[in-house]
Amino acid sequence: MFTDRFSFGVTLKWVHEGLADYSGETFAVDLGTLYDTGFKGVKLGMCFQNMGASYKFRDDGKESPMPIVFKVGASMPILDVPDHRLLGSFEFNHPPDGAERINLGAEYVYQKFGPNFELALRGGYRFNRDEETFTGGFGVKFPFVRIGLASKPSIWGVDYGFSEMGVLGTSHKISLWATF
C-alpha cells in the first residue's frame, strides 16, 4: 500500500516448460496496481504479466519471447447491506497472440454468522475464447484456533472453482489458505 487508496504489487517467478526431450526456462515478473476511486466502492486495476527474458525451448538455438499480457479491470459493489454483499467485476485482457478478451464476473457473500465467517458464491463468463466460457465456484472463510501468541484467531478458507472448457471438459480448482 502506498496510500490508503493505491497499492502496487510485484510477483517474481521462475518459468519452466518441458515436453519430451525439449525444455526451456527463464525468469519473469508480473507488475500490478489497484486504485480505490473513493466513488461508490469502485476499484480499478491494471497489470502486466510475464515480462521477462526470452528462453530457448529447443536445442536449435532459437529463442522464444515470453508472452506479455496486459490486463485492466474494474469492480464495484452492487449490493452492500448487513449480512449480504454482491460484487460485480469486468476485465479486459490483451494477449500478444490473439484477439482481445473480456471477462465478466460476480461474487455474492453471505455473512450471517459473523464478520470472520463467510460463504461466497461466484460466477462468470469469458468472451472471445476458443473453449473456456462459463466459470463458477464457492468459498468458505472461517475463524480457527489461535496460533502461538496471536491475540485473535487465524482465518482459514477453502475455495473451489470450475471452468467449462468445451471439448476439453471441465477444469476443477481447489485452494486452501490461511492468515495468521
Image (cartoon, rainbow, N blue to C red):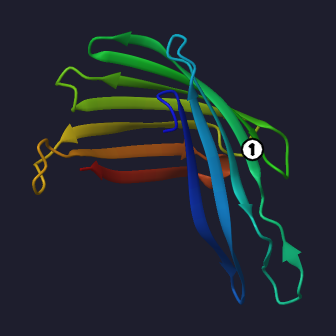
- Frontmost residue, 71 versus 18: 71
- Frontmost residue, 7 versus 105: 7
Horizontally, is 99 left or right of 123 in the view? right
Q: Where is residue 70 in the image (x, y as percent from the top left)?
A: 74, 44
To which residue does mark 1 refer?
70
Q: Residue at x 52, y 37 (%)?
A: 2
Categorize mark 1 by other alpha carbons within 10 Å: few (<14), some (14-19), many (20+).
Answer: some
Q: Residue at x 10, y 53 (%)?
A: 149
User: Mark 1 falls on what kind of element?
Assistant: strand
Can I make out residue 90 in this image? no
Q: Residue at x 28, y 50 (%)?
A: 178
**Residue 59, placed above or below residue 13:** below
Q: Where is residue 160 in the image (x, y as percent from the top left)?
A: 39, 45
Q: Residue at x 46, y 28 (%)?
A: 4
Q: In which quarter of the image is residue 33?
A: top right
**Residue 170, placed above or below residue 93:** below
Can I make out residue 170 in this image? yes
Identity of the residue furthest to the front in this view: 3
**Residue 42, placed above or below residue 47:** above
Q: Where is residue 103 in the image (x, y as percent from the top left)?
A: 65, 32
Q: Where is residue 55 in the image (x, y as percent from the top left)?
A: 78, 76
Q: In which quarter of the image is residue 157?
A: top left
- Frontmost residue, 81 versus 170: 81
Exactly how many numbered labels are in the figure? Answer: 1
Amino acid at circle 1: Phe
